[in-house]
Image (spheres, grey):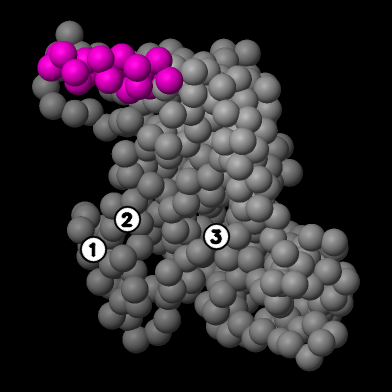
C-alpha cells in the first residue's frame, strides 16, 4: 500500500513541476493575435521561459522588462492604456534572440464570462443569431471579440491552458457564446469601444466547480464541498487517509466478490476510488483548470449564467454564490469587481412537488438584493 501511495505522490509531483530545460519563450493562454486589452488599467502580460531569461514586452510605445524566476515564470505590467480601435502589434522577446509578435491587438473593455450550458450555447443557434449575422456580414470589422478557454479539470491550479483558435473576430460571431455576445453587443453600442469576452464555461456543471478552493474552505457553510476537495487531495492528511481506507475497503471487496462469484451470488458494489476519478467536475476543479490559467488577465468585470445543475441545493446555493464571487474577486485582486448574473429561467409548468429550480431563482433574487454593490 505504501508503495502505491508513494507512486501516486511521485506522479503528482512530476505533473506539478515542469523541467526548466523544457522552458521556451511562451505566452500564457489569453495572449494571442486579435486580443483585446483592458483600457485604463494596469495590464499584466505574462508567460514562461528558461529561468533567468530576460523578457521584454513592447506595446503602444511602452517597453517593459522582467526576469523569468526559478520556475520559468515572468510577468510585466503595462501602464494604463487608452482606448484604441487601431490594430497594433505586441512584441515579446528574450535575451536569447527568441521573439513572439502578436498582431491585431485592440484596447477596450474586457469581461470574463462563465457558467454552464446556457453560457456555452452559441449565438448561431439562438435568438442572437441575427446579431451574429449582422456582425459577420459587416463591411467594417466590428471590434467585438471572444476567446474560449478549453475545458480542463484539475486538482490544483494550473498555469497553462489551451484555446482553439485564440481570440476570434466578430466575423466568427455565430460561434460565440450567445449570452456573452448579447452583452458585448449592447456594451459596444453604449460605449463605442472594442469589447472582448474571455469565456471559460462548461455545460452541465455545478457552481462549486468554478469556485476557488480557498473561498470554499473559508466559507463556514461549505464544509461539505471542502471535504470533497480534501478527500481528493493525496498531498494532505485527509486525502492520504481516504486512499488508505480505499485500499483497505478494496481488499475486503475482493474477498467478498470472490466468494460471491464462487457461489453464483450477487456481486457487491466496488468501493469508489478517492480523487478526481468520477468527479472531474468536482469543487474547484474547473477553476483550477479553466480559470486559474487566465488570472490575472486585466478585465472590467465578470458575467455568470448557471443554476440548473444545482437545482436541488436549496438555500446552500447562496453560500456557494458568495464563495464564487469572493474567490474570483480575491484571485484577480479586485475586491469590488463588478459581477453580473442571470436569474434562472422558468422551466415547464408549476409543480408544488418539484421546487428545486424555484428555490435557486429565489436564492439568486435574494443574493442580488443583499449584494447590490457591483452585482
Mark 1 residue crowding within 10 angstroms, few (<14) / some (14–19) / many (20+): some
**Residue 182 percent across, percent down from the top left:** 36, 55
Q: Nearer the viewer, mark 3 or mark 1?
A: 3
Q: Is residue 8 above or below residue 271?
A: below
**Residue 280 percent across, percent down from the top left:** 43, 39
CA separation in Å, label 2 and label 1 = 8 Å
Mark 2 residue crowding within 10 angstroms, few (<14) / some (14–19) / many (20+): many
Q: Which residue is mark 2?
A: 178
Helix or strand or loop: what does disc 2 sit on? helix
**Residue 124 got which mark?**
1
| Sequence-first tag of 3 and 1 | 1
Query: In which quadrant is the C terminus drawn?
Result: top right
Helix or strand or loop: what does disc 3 sit on? loop
Mark 3 residue crowding within 10 angstroms, few (<14) / some (14–19) / many (20+): some
Q: Is residue 293 above or below residue 163?
A: above
Q: Which residue is mark 3?
A: 161
Query: Left or right: 121 with respect to 290?
Result: left
| Sequence-first tag of 2 and 3 | 3
Residue at 88% in and 71% down? 52
CA separation in Å, label 3 and label 1 = 26 Å
> Where are the magenta residues, as a range?
251-271
Helix or strand or loop: what does disc 1 sit on? helix
Amino acid at each position: 500500500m505504501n508503495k502505491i501511495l508513494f507512486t501516486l505522490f511521485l506522479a503528482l509531483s512530476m505533473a506539478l513541476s515542469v523541467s526548466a530545460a523544457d522552458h521556451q519563450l511562451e505566452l500564457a493562454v489569453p495572449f494571442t493575435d486579435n486580443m483585446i486589452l483592458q483600457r485604463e488599467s494596469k495590464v499584466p502580460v505574462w508567460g514562461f521561459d528558461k529561468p533567468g531569461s530576460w523578457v521584454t514586452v513592447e506595446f503602444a510605445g511602452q517597453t517593459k522588462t522582467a526576469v523569468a524566476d526559478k520556475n520559468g515564470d515572468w510577468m510585466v505590467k503595462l501602464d494604463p492604456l487608452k482606448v484604441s480601435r487601431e490594430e497594433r502589434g505586441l512584441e515579446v522577446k528574450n535575451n536569447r534572440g527568441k521573439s513572439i509578435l502578436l498582431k491585431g491587438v485592440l484596447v477596450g473593455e474586457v469581461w470574463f464570462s462563465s457558467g454552464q450550458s446556457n453560457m456555452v450555447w452559441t449565438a448561431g443557434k439562438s435568438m442572437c443569431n441575427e446579431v451574429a449575422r449582422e456582425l459577420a456580414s459587416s463591411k467594417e470589422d466590428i471590434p467585438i471579440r471572444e476567446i474560449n478557454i478549453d475545458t480542463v479539470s484539475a486538482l490544483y491550479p494550473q498555469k497553462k491552458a489551451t484555446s482553439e483558435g485564440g481570440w476570434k473576430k466578430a466575423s466568427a460571431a455565430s460561434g460565440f457564446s450567445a449570452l456573452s455576445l448579447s452583452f458585448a453587443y449592447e456594451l459596444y453600442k453604449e460605449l463605442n469601444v472594442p469589447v472582448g469576452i474571455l469565456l471559460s464555461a462548461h455545460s452541465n456543471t455545478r457552481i462549486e466547480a468554478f469556485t476557488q478552493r480557498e473561498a470554499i474552505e473559508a466559507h463556514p457553510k461549505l464544509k461539505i464541498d471542502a471535504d470533497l476537495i480534501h478527500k481528493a487531495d493525496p498531498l494532505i492528511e485527509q486525502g492520504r487517509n481516504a486512499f488508505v481506507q480505499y485500499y483497505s475497503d478494496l481488499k475486503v471487496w475482493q474477498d467478498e466478490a470472490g466468494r460471491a462469484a464462487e457461489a453464483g451470488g450477487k456481486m457487491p458494489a466496488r468501493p469508489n476510488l478517492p480523487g478526481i476519478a468520477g468527479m472531474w467536475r468536482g469543487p474547484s476543479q474547473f477553476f483550477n483548470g479553466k480559470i486559474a490559467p487566465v488570472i490575472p488577465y486585466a478585465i472590467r468585470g465578470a458575467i455568470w449564467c448557471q443554476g440548473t445543475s444545482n437545482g436541488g441545493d436549496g438555500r446552500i446555493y447562496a453560500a456557494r454564490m458568495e464563495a464564487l464571487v469572493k474567490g474570483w474577486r480575491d484571485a484577480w485582486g479586485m475586491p469590488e469587481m463588478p459581477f453580473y448574473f442571470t436569474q434562472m429561467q422558468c422551466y415547464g409548468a408549476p409543480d408544488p412537488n418539484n421546487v428545486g429550480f424555484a428555490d435557486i431563482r429565489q436564492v439568486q433574487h435574494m443574493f442580488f438584493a443583499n449584494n447590490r454593490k457591483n452585482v
